Amino acid sequence: SSIYVSLWVQELFLKSSDCGLPPKLQFASPLSQLYESNFKAGTVLKYACHSGYRRVNSSRVTCGAYGAWIYSNFCIKKQCRNPGELTNGKVDVMTDFLFGSTIQFSCSKGYVLIGSTNSQCEVQGSEVEWSDPLPECVIVKCESPPEISNGKHDGGDEDLYTFGSSVTYSCDPNFSLIGNATIYCMVENKTLGVWRPNPPVCKSKTHNIPQGIFISGFKPFYTHKDSIVISCKKGYVLRGSNLIHCEAHNEWDCNICHTPPYPEATYECIEGYILVGFAIAHAKLFGVLCPKPTVENGRLAREKDHYVAMENITIQCDFGYNVVGSQSITCSVNKTWYPEVPEGCEQVIIGRKLMQCLPNLEEVKMALQIYKLSLQIERLEQEKDKCIKLRENIFSICDMHW
């Protein structure tokens, strides 16, 4: 039995010393075609380097005593030549110049790359060369700068402008330049020459301020960012600062002169006092005028040619006359009187009317006294008016003599 075990071990050892198929190397292949799948120990195969590689050592691959192929890296990558310098650009070496490596090209700012952006070290014939030659970096060019309405630029008549060139715009008289006066030839998307920023626009000079009056900063015309100090015309109120600026849209930065509101103010007396006069006061709007009303057999408490909005006047009738309608009227914002101007004053017997209203003798006596007093006051007012007219006549006579 020991003899059989020895023979089995010997047979197993002999079988294990065979090599299988030879290795498939990245850089080399066997010189001859192989038809066997097992190789005895000591078998030597010759390999040839692949394209792009060159042999540096023995290219033999040997089947070892224990069924393994023995070899060294006998082929190494070939190297492409140095691609050189790229004018107005640069060459980026990703790893090296060996077979299979890649280099990339880029241009300096303001230049456009004409050609391939990269190149690979590849096999060409029996050697290795770069797949693409060095590209060319050409300076960016822009077309003629755009024209603008009511203005011009100083660029001349050139058809093309190189990267970094600039032109400056100016506006025609009485027009204001809005935006950047100078624009530049720039590069966009690394290929296209464009003008940046956008060209300015020329707008007509700013208009006067509605309902405003210039106080300082007088000019024939005003342009963007100019400032002035204003006040409002009569009948309008100022809201905000009186220093305003000319904005980009060629209008003043705000409309600050406004029609004032017309609020009513109501008066109330504290305890122990009674109200004398009107309980409601109105704001006056000086921008609105009402014509002077005429009252037959009467006159106005304040005689003027015109009256402003919310101004109240009282109608006074001649002696022995009473007003037909409202005695107090107000100038409204629509230039009419409210309530309507009375038709006039009609003659009445005031004493009889008072007698009809009073219930007893004591009140009749008091009413008569009040009536007499009112007559005296009216006579005094009439005398006063006569004196004023007489004085005016005297002054006019003096003027004639002088």
Image (cartoon, rainbow, N blue to C red):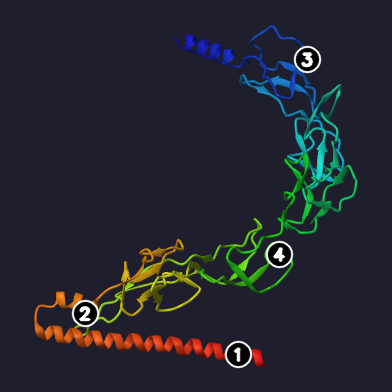
Label 1 vs 4, first from the N-terminus: 4
The amino acid type, in three-letter code, at marker 4 is Tyr
Q: Are marks 1 and 4 in contact (CB under 8 Å)?
A: no
Q: CA distance from mark 1 to mark 4?
A: 54 Å
Residue at which label 2 appears: 351
Left or right of residue 21: residue 286: left
Front label number (4 vs 2): 2
| Residue 26 falls left or right of residue 372 | right
Report, in whole angstroms, how far the alpha carbon at label 1 lies from the one at label 2.
Answer: 43 Å
Q: Earlier in the sequence, mark 4 or mark 2?
A: 4
Q: Is the C-beta separation of discs 3 and 2 under 8 Å?
A: no
Precedes in sequence: disc 4 or disc 3: 3
The residue at which mark 4 appears reads as 222
Residue 218 is situated, as x and y percent measured from the top left of the image, at: 70, 72
Q: Which residue is mark 1?
A: 397
Whole-percent x and y of residue 400? 65, 89
Q: Residue furthest top?
A: 35
Q: Distance from label 3 to label 2 (Cα)?
A: 152 Å
The correct choice, above or below, for 118 with respect to 290 in the image is above
Q: Which residue in the structure is indicated by mark 3?
A: 31
User: Considering only vertical position in the picture, is 184 above or below 289?
Assistant: above
116 vs 80, nearest the viewer: 116
Q: Which of marks 2 and 1 precedes in the sequence? A: 2
The crowd level at tag 2 (other Cα within 10 Å; few <14, some 14-19, many 20+) is few
Q: Position of residue 303 (x, y in %)?
A: 46, 78
> Callout 4: 10 Å neighbours few (<14), some, many (20+)?
many
- Please state which of residues 15 and 220 is positioned toward the viewer in this rendering: 220
The number of callouts visible is: 4
Tag nearer the camera, 1 or 4? 1
Identity, as a three-letter code, of the amino acid under mark 2: Gly
